[in-house]
């Protein structure tokens, strides 16, 4: 890969800095997809000692690239995303990856295949962190920014995704406790 090709990849990825997500920050500012990807990558890095049998560098890589398709489509919240939305995003991402220098395209393609198959512990950890980060962010955001369905989603979402791991299941339970505390504080308001 030459420097021009490298910069072109970075210019496409930069779009995620300006691609808004459904969630907001603690202060109510709409977060970007890049911010979400950064935090799940940090989450993975911090779990290195909890999952010593796992290639956490690979998990971090998965976290970094998992939403690159949204460079082309924008973010559609999980509860609104249709199969057609997923297909469009996947097709555009596949076309872009195929246009990259061969060695980079091969690396990314292999990661995406592993992520989609959900057969390795690395891919399951990445997927769990992706969902858990959204829940954590909702707990950090003002309730006034939640949509009606998120009151229930924050109580039930992702338990099935973490069930392969005792540690991630415990984390999901802590997130639920935070959700319930947040909702209880609002009621007492």
Image: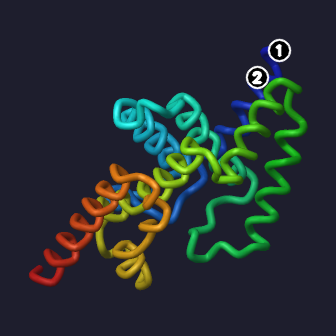
What numbered label is drawn on residue 6?
2
Residue ID at (56%, 41%): 122
Q: Eyeballing the image, is 163 above or below 95?
A: below
Circles 2 and 1, Cβ within 8 Å, touching? The answer is yes
Residue 168 locus on image (x, y percent): 37, 52
Which of these two is toward me, 24 or 117?
117
Residue ID at (35%, 30%): 49
Quarter holding residue 10: top right
The outermost residue toward the top is: 2
Q: Eyeballing the image, is 93 above or below 86?
A: above
Which quadrant is home to the C terminus? bottom left
Residue 84 locus on image (x, y percent): 79, 73
- 45 horizontally vs 184: left or right: right
- 88 horizontally vs 155: left or right: right
Category of crowding for the residue at label 1, using alpha-carbon neighbours closer than 10 angstroms: few (below 14), some (14–19), many (at least 20):
few
Q: Mark 1 — residue? A: 2
């Amino acid at each position: 890969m030459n420097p021009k090709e490298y910069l072109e990849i970075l210019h496409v990825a930069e779009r995620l800095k300006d691609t808004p997500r459904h969630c907001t920050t603690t202060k109510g500012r709409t977060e970007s997809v890049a911010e979400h990807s950064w935090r799940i990558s940090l989450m993975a890095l911090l779990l290195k000692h909890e999952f010593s049998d796992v290639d956490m560098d690979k998990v971090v890589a998965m976290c970094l690239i998992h939403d690159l398709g949204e460079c082309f489509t924008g973010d559609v919240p999980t509860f609104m995303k249709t199969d057609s939305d997923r297909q469009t995003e996947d097709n555009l991402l596949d076309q872009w990856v195929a246009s990259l220098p061969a060695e980079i395209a091969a690396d990314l393609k292999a990661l995406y295949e592993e992520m989609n198959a959900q057969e390795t512990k690395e891919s399951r950890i990445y997927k769990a962190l992706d969902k858990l980060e959204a829940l954590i962010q909702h707990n950090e955001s003002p309730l006034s920014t939640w949509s009606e369905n998120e009151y229930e989603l924050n109580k039930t979402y992702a338990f099935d995704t973490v069930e392969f791991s005792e540690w991630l299941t415990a984390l999901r339970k802590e997130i639920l406790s935070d959700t319930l505390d947040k909702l209880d504080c609002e009621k007492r308001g």
